[in-house]
């Protein structure tokens, strides 16, 4: 028994060490939420992608599908904006994810963009320690357990367990698209110029008629007056005779 007792002690110590190391709960394929009592930190992520305008809508839908696949408990769509015109497309989406899933989700966003001919332009990361806010809110709720205090405490705690991920989609035109946009702009300029000319002629035409009537009317009056009162003609001979030279 003396020899077997140390063996059992070693096994027990080994199991205890393993249980101490396993202090995180996996929520994503490559992520975990720490449960070791460290500071309460609220994380936020922003990704900005450059894409050809024709695939912006497609990539937005792909990213929304990625969120839907994770389930509402891990990923939710908060806001979506989409702007499309004849020459460009842009948009943005704001997701809300379980804090442990936020960073792997951001990594997963890149692959569809690259496959569609786009690229990651920037990636911003921010972290805020909200431990003091939680402690203050807990004291206020304990002193006055009103609905407002309880809601404030729930909001600040939610910032720790949920992380916002904002995705911005910018239009980046390729060479062919730039040529097409230039031709389209030239066509619009020509159309605008022709329209302006038509408006000008439409505005000037009545005045042109008025001026034409006045011109020809005055001309006719002058001719008629000259016929009624002809000027005496002076010959060159009379001029030479009256000349002092």
Image (tube, helix red, strand yellow):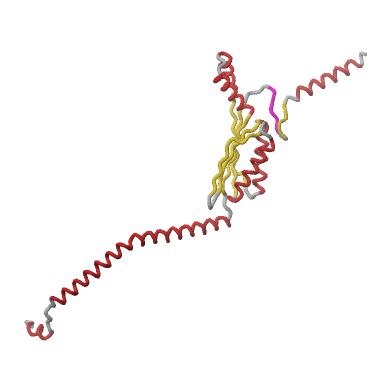
Residue 204 vs 224, above or below: the answer is above
Q: Please tell me in which quadrant of the rendered image residue 192 appears.
A: bottom left
Tally of numbered tags: 0
Q: Position of residue 228 (x, y in %)?
A: 14, 76
Which residues make up the magenta segment? 31-36
Q: Which residue is nearer to you in this view: 206 or 25? A: 206
Residue 127 lies, with reference to residue 53, above or below; the image says above
* Residue 33 falls left or right of residue 196: right
Looking at the image, which residue sits at the far bottom?
237
Quarter of the C terminus within the rendering:
bottom left
Q: Position of residue 150 (x, y in %)?
A: 58, 20
Q: Position of residue 206 (x, y in %)?
A: 31, 62
The picture quadrant where one finds residue 76 is: top right
Quadrant (top left, top right, bottom left, bottom right) of the N terminus? top right
Q: Does residue 102 appear to the left or right of 217 in the view shown? A: right
Magenta region, main secondary structure:
strand
What residue is shown at x 63% (from left), y 23% (from top)? 39
């Amino acid at each position: 028994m003396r020899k077997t007792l140390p063996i059992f002690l070693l096994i027990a110590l080994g199991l205890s060490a393993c249980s101490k190391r396993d202090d995180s709960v996996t929520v994503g394929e490559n992520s975990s939420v720490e449960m070791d009592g460290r500071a309460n930190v609220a994380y936020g992520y922003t990704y900005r992608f450059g894409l050809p305008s024709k695939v912006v809508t497609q990539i937005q839908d792909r990213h929304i599908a990625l969120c839907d696949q994770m389930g509402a408990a891990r990923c939710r769509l908060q806001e979506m904006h989409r702007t499309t015109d004849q020459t460009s497309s842009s948009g943005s989406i704001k997701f809300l994810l379980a804090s442990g899933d936020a960073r792997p989700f951001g990594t997963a966003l890149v692959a569809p963009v690259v496959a569609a001919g786009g690229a990651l332009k920037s990636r911003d990361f921010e972290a805020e320690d909200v431990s003091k806010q939680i402690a203050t809110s807990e004291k206020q709720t304990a002193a006055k357990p009103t609905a407002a205090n309880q809601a404030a405490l729930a909001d600040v705690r939610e910032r720790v367990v949920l992380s916002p991920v904002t995705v911005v989609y910018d239009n980046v035109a390729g060479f062919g698209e730039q040529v097409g946009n230039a031709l389209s702009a030239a066509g619009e300029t020509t159309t605008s110029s022709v329209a302006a000319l038509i408006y000008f002629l439409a505005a000037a035409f009545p005045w042109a008629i008025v001026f034409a009537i006045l011109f020809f009317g005055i001309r006719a009056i002058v001719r008629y007056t000259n016929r009624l009162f002809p000027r005496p003609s002076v010959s060159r001979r009379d001029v030479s005779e009256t000349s002092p030279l």
